[in-house]
Amino acid sequence: MERVSELRENYLEVERRVADACKRAGRDRGEVTLIAVSKTKPLEDILVVSDFGQKTFGENRVQEVLSKIADTPKDRDIKWHLIGHLQTNKVRQIVGKTELIHSVDSFKLAEMIDKESEKLGICTDILMEINIGSEESKFGVSYEAAGELARRIGRLSHVRLMGLMTVAPIVSDPSDARPFFRRMKELFVDINSKNYDNVSMSVLSMGMSSDFEVAIEEGATMVRVGTGIFGERVYNT
Ligand SMILES: *Cc1c(COP(=O)(O)O)cnc(C)c1O
């Protein structure tokens, strides 16, 4: 019971901060989708947060999301997003299971998702992950290479490129992330203006627990919040 109250308090607080950031930015609350990032957290927590009305959950590991999907009662209206790095050898397992894959960062990966989708007779919605801070430690396409990759992905008939995603550099003051988010928005608008076939820039996935308000102010349409809702993660080693 205590856990339920804790989750409710966290969730309402995040929801309030999302709404306030939208208001500050002169945006409608409906323009921003909150993704509850449930990695490492038990299914019980997910079902509790789903009871509060949360529809979309983000996971970063294929194995973990598949086992959670398998264990989720069928009458639950839950959508799953893969937000973490996807290895090409896991593509077959994940295609068809998620509403959106946020982390496509190469043509090869897009092509494999396309092939698997074709086999299933579906079209898979994807985002292209951008390494906006040009960080050695991060996955993602460079700002410079993004336009050309979008154009190539657009030629694939069983994936649909819906937008861009980024994990901004870790900064001590959230407002220091603002220039990175602003640059993402510029790229988003720029690629959109090219009108590539089969490419629609409608989703801009950026902002996490530490910086989602700044991301919303700079144009995010999806924010991915884990710790803010579920509390700190504990990794077993
Ligand atoms: C874990 C994770 C998040 C959520 O991080 P928090 O800081 O806990 O909100 C968001 N996006 C990605 C890609 C992640 O892996």
Image (cartoon, helix red, strand yellow):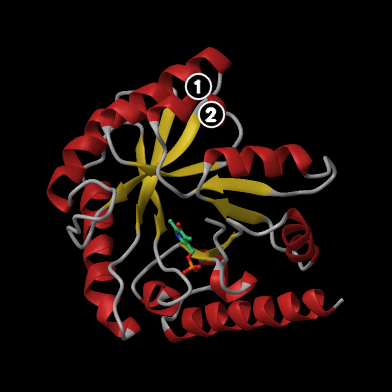
The percent position of residue 85, horizontal first and vertical second, equals 40, 44
Mark 1 secondary-structure assignment = helix
Q: On the rendered image, what quadrant is the N terminus found in?
A: bottom right
The residue depicted at 43 percent of the width and 77 percent of the height is: 210
Q: Amino acid at mark 2?
A: Val
Q: Nearer the viewer, residue 165 or 23?
A: 165
Front position among marks 1 and 2: 2
> Residue 25 got which mark?
none
Q: Is residue 204 above or below residue 9?
A: above
The residue depicted at 65 percent of the width and 59 percent of the height is: 41
Q: Is residue 12 above or below residue 63?
A: below
Mark 2 residue's CB less than 8 Å from ligand 1: no
Q: Is residue 87 above or below residue 51?
A: above
Position of 99 with respect to 125 (left or right) is right
- Whether residue 33 is visible here, answered yes or no, is yes
The percent position of residue 230, horizontal first and vertical second, equals 64, 70
The residue depicted at 44 percent of the width and 48 percent of the height is: 84
The percent position of residue 72, horizontal first and vertical second, equals 78, 44
Mark 1 residue's CB less than 8 Å from ligand 1: no
Q: Is residue 199 above or below residue 83?
A: above
- Do tag 1 and tag 2 residues touch (Cβ < 8 Å)? yes
Tag 2 residue: 95
Tag 1 residue: 117
Q: Amino acid at mark 1?
A: Ser
- Whether residue 157 is visible here, answered yes or no, is no
Q: Residues within 10 Å of mark 1 (few under 14, many from 20)?
A: many
